[in-house]
Image (spheres, rainbow, N blue to C red):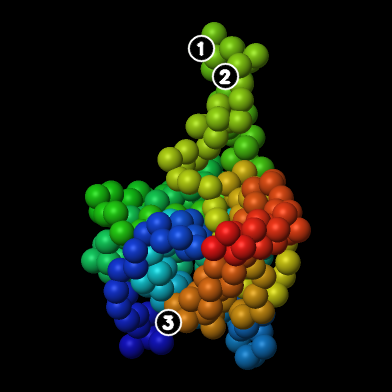
Amino acid sequence: MDEHRREVEPPRCRGQVGVEGNPLHVALIMDGNGRWANERGLPRTEGHRAGEVALMDTIAGAIEAGVRYLSVYAFSTENWRRSPTEVRFLMGYSKDVLRRRRDELNRWGVRVRWSGRSPRLWSSVIKELRAAEELTADNDVLDFIMCVNYGGRAELADAAAAIAREARQGRLDPAKVTEKTLARRLYLPDVPDVDLVIRTSGEQRMSNFLPWQAAYAELLFVSDPWPTYGRDKLRRDLEAFGGRQRRFGGAVDALASCETAAGAAREG
């Protein structure tokens, strides 16, 4: 069997969603496939093939940890700038992976969802995305969001265009536009904001990925190239997230906290 098409051990358990300290929504920038391949004297496409097993194992790990939403940056609106050969491979391979893995994801209780733009994306890829969405629509263990032909600025531009159309039609008062108005017009408005963004392979930038949803996300930039990632490294990164203190624009007065604790100790 092709090493990159082998079965992945299914989730060993189903973690409890909403446990304090655990992220509800994790977003992954799967970086380093090409570099991993080049370091081994392989074509870049082999790095993408190797990333398939890493992705499936990471999905299994997310289920085990009780993550409810997992968004992955599969193909950006900027990736069209890559060589025609690599773009053709990525389009064809995306179709192939979806077709081969959707039954497995369905058995795991995963709901597959697509976020991105239709224009320019191959119709055959859209067909496979829609087929996976339809097959898994009733699953509720994990929402697996494939961001294909996705760009954060494009999503915001599309939301702004929708607001402008509704205002022109008299169905929306421009004076009453709020953050919620825009949020309701994002590609998947029912999906909660991102709690944790993980980018592999050492690069430290967001690359136009979920800028609205990740406004208050914790960021982890790890050195592992994507083909070496999986459930064990996800568990490590979730533990790192558990040690973060999220303030959402607020602040903690360390001195006041110490005085409060000291007072409580005296009263006890």
Label disc, if present, on residue 165 of the rendered structure: 2
Residue at the extreme bottom of the image, as rendered: 40
> Does 172 appear above or below 18?
above
> Counting residues from the N terminus, which is met first, the one under dot 1 or under dot 2?
2
Q: Nearer the viewer, mark 1 or mark 3?
A: 1
Badge 1 marks a residue whose secondary structure is loop
Q: Amino acid at mark 3?
A: His
Residue displayed at 58% across by 59% down? 267
> Counting residues from the N terminus, which is met first, the one under dot 1 or under dot 3?
3
> Does 169 appear above or below 229?
above
| Image quadrant in which you'd find residue 41 | bottom right
Q: Nearer the viewer, mark 1 or mark 2?
A: 1
| Image quadrant in which you'd find residue 57 | bottom left
Label disc, if present, on residue 4 of the rendered structure: 3
Residue displayed at 44% across by 73% down? 58
Task: Kindly tell me whether residue 247 is visible in this rendering.
Answer: yes
Locate the N terminus and report the quarter of the image it occupies: bottom left
> Does 165 appear above or below 187?
above
Badge 1 density bin: few <14, some 14–19, many ≥20, Cα 10 Å? few
x%, y% of residue 44? 61, 77
For label 1, the residue is 171
Assess whether mark 3 and mark 1 are in contact (beta carbons under 8 angstroms): no
Locate the C terminus and report the quarter of the image it occupies: bottom right
Q: CA distance from mark 2 to mark 3?
A: 46 Å
Badge 3 density bin: few <14, some 14–19, many ≥20, Cα 10 Å? some
Q: Nearer the viewer, residue 132 or 64?
A: 64
x%, y% of residue 124? 40, 53
> Counting residues from the N terminus, which is met first, the one under dot 2 or under dot 3?
3
Q: Amino acid at mark 2?
A: Arg
